[in-house]
Image (cartoon, grey):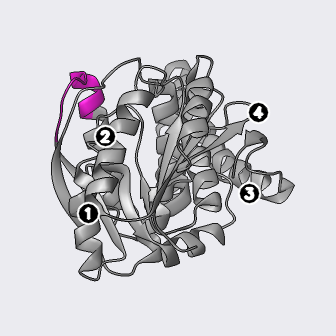
Amino acid sequence: MNMDISVIIPIYNEEENIGHLYKRLSAVMEKLGVSYEFIFVNDGSRDKSIHLIKELSTTHAEVKYIDFSRNFGHQIAVTAGLDKSAGQAVVIIDADLQDPPELIAEMYQKMKEGYEVVYAQRKSRKGESFLKKLTAKAFYRILSKITSISIPVDTGDFRIIDRKIVDILKDMPEKNKYLRGQISWIGFNQTYVEYERDERHGGETGYTYRKMFRFAIDGITAFSDFPMKVVTFFGFIVSLFAFIVTVFAIFSWLVLKNVVPGWTSLMISILFIGGIQMIAIGIIGEYLGRMNSNVRDRPLYIIRDSNI
C-alpha cells in the first residue's frame, strides 16, 4: 500500500513529550486526510521512552518504532528512520515540541505546489540561553559563507522532503551525517515556511555544547575545505615570518656585528610556529578521521528491536 506521509521522530529521553507529540501529530494528519505512519527512533534513551512508544504501537497501527542498541546520535537516528520510511513525503521533526507539528499542514501544501523540499525557518527561538542563540546564529552564518553550497540559515532538521530526496540520501555513504547540508547539496526545488520556535515542552535537551561543537565540526568538514585553506594561508605567513627573521639574524651577524641572545624572540617564534602546526595537524586529523570512518565501513547503527 502506498503511504502518503512518514513522520520520523528521533527520541532521546523524551518520556515527558511522547504522548503530547502523538496527539498533536495525529490531529494534524487526520485533518489532512492522508495515510501516514509515525516512525519513532529510540536513540539509546535511559528513561521510559521506548516503553511508552511500544504501548502506543499496540493500540495504534500507524506507530512504528526502531530501538537502537545504544546511543548513535541524532543524525544517525534520523537516517535510520529514512531507511525504513515508506511515505511519498517524509517529515523530520524532533520530539521536544519546540517545532510545532501543526506547521506540517502548511509545509505539505507547499510540497503539493511542486516543491521537493520544504524546510521550516525560525524567526525566533524561545526558552534558549543568549549564548546558545549567539553560537547557533554565528555557526549557521559562518557555514553559509565557507561552503560551496547554499545551506539555509536559522533552520534545523524540521522539514518535509519528497521520496526522491530520501532515495538519494540513502545512496550517500558518508558516516558523519549532516543531513540538512546533504539535502541542500542534492538540490531540486526547495522553499521554506517561517515560524516562531516554542520552548521545550518537557524534559531537558540532549544537545550539550560538546555535542553542538561536534555537530558543527561535522557540518564544516562535510561541506567545506575552508579550514585546509586557512591552514595553508597561515603556513605561508609563518614561512614569510621565519624568512624575515632569518634574514635579519644574518644581517645582524655579518653587517652590524651585533649578536643578540634573542631568547624572547626565539621562544615566541617556536611557540607561534608550534601552535600553527598543532592547529594544522588537528584540522587534517578531522578530515582523515572522517575518511577512516568511511573506510572501516561499519554499520551506521545497530537495531535492538523494531516493528517495521
Query: What amino acid type should be assigned to the residue bearing mark 4?
Result: Ser
Q: CA distance from mark 1 to mark 3?
A: 36 Å
Please give the name of the residue rendered at 59% of the width and 53% of the height, measured from the top-left corner. 81
Query: What amino acid type should be assigned to the residue bearing mark 1?
Result: Met
Crowding at label 4, few (<14), some or many (≥20) Cα neighbours within 10 Å?
some
Which residue occupies the foreground of this view, 208 or 24? 24
Mark 4 or mark 1: which comes first in sequence?
Answer: 4
**Residue tagged by mark 3?**
291
Q: CA distance from mark 3 to mark 2?
A: 41 Å
Q: Is residue 254 in view?
A: no
Please give the name of the residue rendered at 51% of the width and 47% of the height, measured from the top-left corner. 238
Which residue occupies the foreground of this view, 301 or 214? 301
Q: CA distance from mark 2 to mark 4?
A: 28 Å
Magenta region, residue range: 124-134
Crowding at label 2, few (<14), some or many (≥20) Cα neighbours within 10 Å?
some
Nearer mark to the viewer, of 4 and 3: 4
Mark 2 or mark 4: which comes first in sequence?
Answer: 2
**Residue tagged by mark 4?**
69
Query: What amino acid type should be assigned to the residue bearing mark 3?
Result: Met
Query: What amino acid type should be assigned to the residue bearing mark 2?
Result: Arg
Give the SS element for disc 2. helix
Q: CA distance from mark 4 to mark 1?
A: 33 Å
Q: CA distance from mark 4 to mark 3?
A: 25 Å
Q: In the current view of this chain or complex, which residue is farthest to the front?
A: 59
Which residue occupies the foreground of this view, 151 or 49? 49
Image side of residue 114 versus residue 267, left or right: left
Nearer mark to the viewer, of 3 and 2: 2
**Residue tagged by mark 1?**
107
* Residues under numbered marks 4 and 1 in contact, where contact means CB atoms less than 8 Å apart: no
Mark 4 or mark 3: which comes first in sequence?
Answer: 4
**Residue tagged by mark 2?**
24
